[in-house]
Image (tube, rainbow, N blue to C red):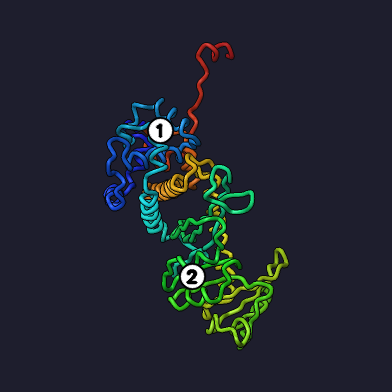
Amino acid sequence: MHQGRTAFSQIMDYFPERAFQKIVGQYEGDKWVQSFSCRSHFNVMAFAQLTGRESLRDIEACLSANGRHLYHMGIRQGFSRNNLAHANETRDWRIYRDTALLLLERARELHAGTPLALALANAIYAFDSSTIDLCQSLFPWAEFRQAKAGIKMHTSVDVRGNIPSFVHISEAKTHDVNALDVLPVEPGAYYLFDRAYLDFARLYALAMRGAFFVTRAKKNTLFRRRASRPVDKPRGLRSDQTGLPGTARDTSYPALLRRVTYRDPGTDKYLCFLTNSLDIPALDVCALYKMRWQVELFFKWVKQHLRIKHFLGTSRNAVHIQLWTGLAVYALVAILAKERFMERSMYEILQFLSVSIFEKTKINEDLFTFTPEPQHEPALFQEILL
């Protein structure tokens, strides 16, 4: 058995310590702090995410029961639930945002070689948003509807590895399409949107920056056909046309656009796709839009396995800190899986860590290979049987 360092310490091997301290200095996170530093704060929040702690008292009780491990976890001194609550309320949440984005970028680099079914070398991003419901009486600053509060997480997921490349947190009442104004655009990349993002002026701005998009048309979307291409109807395609959207007076998208229609043989449903990529095969357009489902799977996974439903504080600052530290932990686990050459899913790795966080066991693929030891009957019992 490995008698070295705890599982938590092994995870933190991939934490960018120098970059983190630089970020802390930029936002003066440790100014006037005597005991509970930003680093200790992050470690406690990461521990809560990995082990499923859902309250301040729960975190305090669990860590107090394992006090001999706190020093090696990077929690030097000053931890209490009051200090944690105060840090969540007052410490600049941008420290943890910048740290999470740094870790996510590292995870994306490691997962960049993940193969896809399409023979496209371009980067492919699925973009969408998900609403996290909050109690209106506890979170009045997150007003959404008359009897409901919430925040919205706008996320661009790299389909190679299912790692977020961009995350923007806003009020839930913010319309999805407004997130396109803050989305960083990578020239040559493909961006996959659903119909909520069908805003031709914003899509044209994205195209002018050298990127490609694939989205779905609405029922009332007008399209002026200029040319048609032959399609392979036995494979589900119905049309492949180029033209201009809108009416003759509409100049919101003054460039050629491509419309591909497809009938899903499984559901017999007609789908109409719009894209500014004029050269790739029509079936690749359909396959690209299907990859948009990756962002939905990411949201589902995050809500099921990260602690973002029960918050440790009710202020805007506390909610942001918990969300960003949760994403940072997600990135750390993704980095761990690649660096240790583990073929297991994120779910399996997190389940192991949740029950073995204090164990001094080397984290590798062998942990998930269970070989039961042979059971030998007692000698006396064997004699009786004979």
Q: Is residue 244 left or right of residue 23?
A: right
Which quadrant is home to the N terminus? top left
Q: Quadrant of residue 285?
A: bottom right
Q: Nearer the viewer, residue 191 or 269?
A: 191
Q: Is residue 144 left or right of residue 115?
A: right
Q: Position of residue 116 (x, y in %)?
A: 49, 63
- Give the residue drawn at x 63%, y 84%: 247
| Spatial CA span between label 1 and label 2 | 46 Å
> Which of the marked residues, 1 or 2, is nearer the chain's N terminus?
1
Judged from the image, the secondary structure of the residue bearing numbered disc 1 is helix
Residue at image mark 2: 190
Q: Nearer the viewer, residue 268 or 220?
A: 220
Q: Position of residue 292 (x, y in %)?
A: 56, 63
- Give the residue drawn at x 52%, y 63%: 127
Amino acid type, label 1: Asn
Residue at image mark 1: 82
Q: Position of residue 351 (x, y in %)?
A: 49, 39
